[in-house]
Image: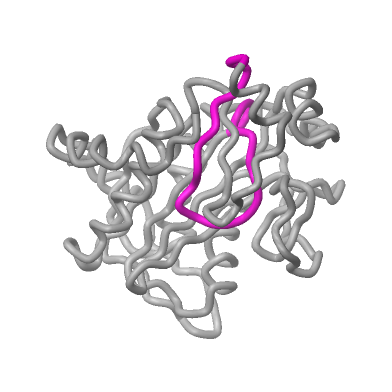
Amino acid sequence: MIGLNGGRTVAPASPADPPFPSSWRWIPPLCLRGDWQMAIDDWLLDQLLLKPGQGVVRLYTWSTPTLSLGYHQRAIPSAWRSAARQGRVALVRRPSGGGAVLHAGSLTYALLWPDPPRQRQLAYSLVGTWLAQSLAPLGLALSPGQEEATPPSANCFACSTAADLVGSDRQKRVGSAQLWRRRQLLQHGSVLIDPPSALWQELFGSTPAAPPSAQGLSVAALEHHLNRTVISSLGGGPLLVEPLRPQEWEAIDRRRHRFRLS
């Protein structure tokens, strides 16, 4: 395990002064199929109770364009099924709620937080601070969305609430969802970079937000800055690089079937 805490620990101010983990496990970025990615997030959430005080942060991409549906999103439009049958997109179900997300031309983050603040919106806000501080050096100014929460849209990126982050053009750039289990938190979300317009139009009947004008915005740049700001934005420490072990991969493999839709 390699310590990456290169500076002073600074916890963001909040009314509740939320507890932060005593350390964060950083799992190096992975590019895998969607059923693997969802099984990893779900399994890691169950492990939080076994290692009190240690949170987990990871970033990942998807090996093929994938549409992830929220846990309660049961209706699957015919256009989605058709695209899946023809191999243009894979379908998976997330363990978290919310609307569908197209994972292509984007980066996904996942944060597993033991004993997080009980106020869900405060947790969203603190993670949003981390994301916004990470993207600011790349020239992308982000702030919380301002739309009222409504029943989830078929397309996660069709609306932006305080749980999401929008750019200066008010276009949604980061969509996030939470899953709470035994008072432990999984929050994961998608950071748009340059999603495929034609596939987005086919699936959602709309066009995605135009790529931001930020210079140097890429998956590699996002990974670098998100890694650097974990401790300063989320408190706790140190940040420990710890890839998944063989026995962990075996346990994760046994739950992949839960998230397959195609």
The one of 75 and 62 positioned closer to us in this rendering = 75
Residue 175 percent coordinates (x, y): 64, 50
Q: Which residue appears at 39% of the width and 32% of the height?
A: 29
Is the residue 86 above or below the residue 221 in the image?
above
The residue that appears at 78% across and 24% down in the rendered structure is 197
- Indicate the quadrant where residue 155 lies: top right
Based on the picture, tell me whether residue 135 belongs to the magenta stretch: no
Picture layout, residue 226 above or below residue 180: above
Q: Is residue 137 visible?
A: no
**The residue positioned farthest toward the left in the image shown:** 247
Q: Position of residue 195 (x, y in %)?
A: 70, 27
The image quadrant of residue 162 is bottom right
- At a point 74% along the width and 48% down the height, the residue shown is 141
Q: Quadrant of residue 125?
A: bottom right
Q: Position of residue 216 (x, y in %)?
A: 66, 26
Task: State yes or no: residue 103 in magenta.
Answer: yes
- Residue 236 located left or right of residue 34: left
Along the line of sight, the residue nearer the viewer: 201 or 190: 201
**What is the tally of numbered marks visible in this picture?**
0
Q: Residue at x 55, y 84 (%)?
A: 15
Q: Main secondary structure of the magenta part?
A: loop
Q: Is residue 3 above or below residue 213?
A: below
**Quadrant that contains the N terminus:** top left
Residue 69 percent coordinates (x, y): 58, 44
- Give the residues in magenta: 86-106
**In this rendering, does residue 145 appear at all?**
yes
Compare residues 26 and 96 and report the one nearer the observer.
96
Left or right of residue 133, residue 198 in this image: right
- Examine the rendered structure and indicate whether residue 186 appears above or below residue 136: below
